[in-house]
Image (cartoon, rainbow, N blue to C red):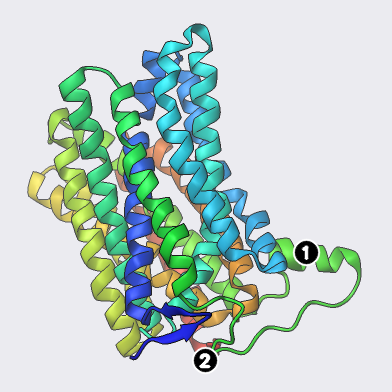
Amino acid sequence: MAHIQRAGTAVWTPWRAVFAFGLVSLTADMVYEGMRAVSGPFLGSLGASALTVGLVTGAGEAVALVLRLATGAWADHSRRHWRLTVVGYAMTAVCVPLLAIAPFVGAAGVALASVLILLERTGKAIRSPAKSALLARMATATGRGRGFGVHKALDQVGAFAGPLLMAGALAVTGAYWPGFAVLAIPGVLCLLLLLAQLRRRVPSIAEPDPEDTPVPAAGGGALRRVRAAVLGSDLPGTFHLFALSAALTTAGLMTFGVISYRFVDAGLVAIAAVPLVYALAMAVEALAALVTGDLFDRWGAGILLAVPALVSVVPVAVFADQLWLVLVGVAVWGLATGVQDSTVKAYVASLVGPSRRATAYGVFAAVQGLGALGGGALAGALVIGHAALLAACIGVLQVVAFGLLWATLRVGRPVS
């Protein structure tokens, strides 16, 4: 596709724009995944109790998900998708390196680090719905499944590199703060790519999307408009069915923390080898995003019906007594997670028109967050001593998720 000109600036081809946006996520992931890899021990080194660590990290994840209800609606209402994306990434690029100061402020170190961690997660909530809406617009010509898949794969490269960079700095210096300082480098690269190139060279979300039909604004009273703006009550019913299905799938897709706790407790994997097992899952997740994204564009959303089946397999395998079967289960977990974080978002863009996509992504993330909260509580209560019951509960959840997804696919009329 030939370049076109906008105000004297060459506009990138769709694939180049998607790849560049993937590099933005790669560099940002290096920053915040590098921080998240050591956030618990780092807070502990400052004198925080286990309760404080749990409250800070748990509150951070809750903020990153639930706040998207407001930031998604804000992006659609203000049409400032790029501004919110840049602000959100800037908060990550600034807050994480500033953690290097915390060890040097004495008793205030825990409070400073906690605030910076929560602000970084707030930045994630601010940018995510707007970023996903922008990516959906960029990927119109590439195929949304492929576009989201390539973006997710690049994102995962950053998820590898950031913790490795932090681990290297920690090994060389024996302290956390140099690692946080070094993470300023990918943070600066992220912002330079956003500000100096990407925003000026890709299609604006305000420009007409040739394959979409905008959703009419909600009418009625003030309360109805607020419900529509924040909770997405005016979004298609198929979107809400799909969100509920994804929430149940997420509830069954246990966190790696629960999985690793179980296989370490069972004596199958040494603590030092846990990062290697996690690396296996991340590699599978990146590959899954690429492959299923391509299949989504070729065969349609029907491939998503495989996700509840995959999730049902995970507890049966990861709770086994044979290491090889546990590793197979971890690989399946990575496969399902990769689809959940990429191809599923491509289908959301197919169900909701461009004028409401950021709202939809915000609602979708909040519903998934509730599913993750419930699933985490279920897994935490049953993983030790009641693994068979946990596997059965997850199986039931996935049967319901499959039924809801089947209903979505039967009645859904994608907007693109």
Q: Residues within 10 Å of mark 1 (few under 14, many from 20)?
A: few
The residue closer to the viewer here, 254 or 101, is 101
Residue 323 at x, y percent in the picture: 9, 44
Mark 1 residue type: Arg
Q: How crowded is mark 2: few (under 14 residues within 10 Å), some or many (20 or more)?
A: few
Q: Dot 1 corresponds to which residue?
A: 227
Instruction: Judge whether 41 appears above or below 305 on screen.
Output: above
Q: Residue at x 34, y 66 (%)?
A: 20
Tell me if 327 is positioned left or right of 21 in this view: left
The residue closer to the viewer here, 50 or 216, is 216
Instruction: Judge whether 106 appears above or below 158 on screen.
Output: above
| Tag count | 2
Residue 286 at x, y percent in the picture: 24, 61
Q: Which mark is residue 104?
A: none
Q: Earlier in the sequence, mark 2 or mark 1?
A: 2
Residue furthest front in the image? 8
Tell me if 163 is positioned left or right of 114 in this view: left
Instruction: Judge whether 357 appears above or below 311 on screen.
Output: below
Task: Kindly check if marks 2 and 1 are in contact, taking CB atoms under 8 A apart as contact.
Answer: no
**Circle 2: element type:** loop
Residue 33 visible in the current orientation: no
The CA span between labels 2 and 1 is: 27 Å
- Identify the image quadrant of residue 263: top left
**Circle 1: element type:** helix
Q: Which residue is drawn at 18% across and 31% down?
A: 168
Residue 47 at x, y percent in the picture: 43, 10
Instruction: Judge whether 192 appears above or below 213 on screen.
Output: above
Residue 307 at x, y percent in the picture: 34, 69
Q: Which mark is residue 211?
A: 2
Q: Residue at x 40, y 42 (%)?
A: 379
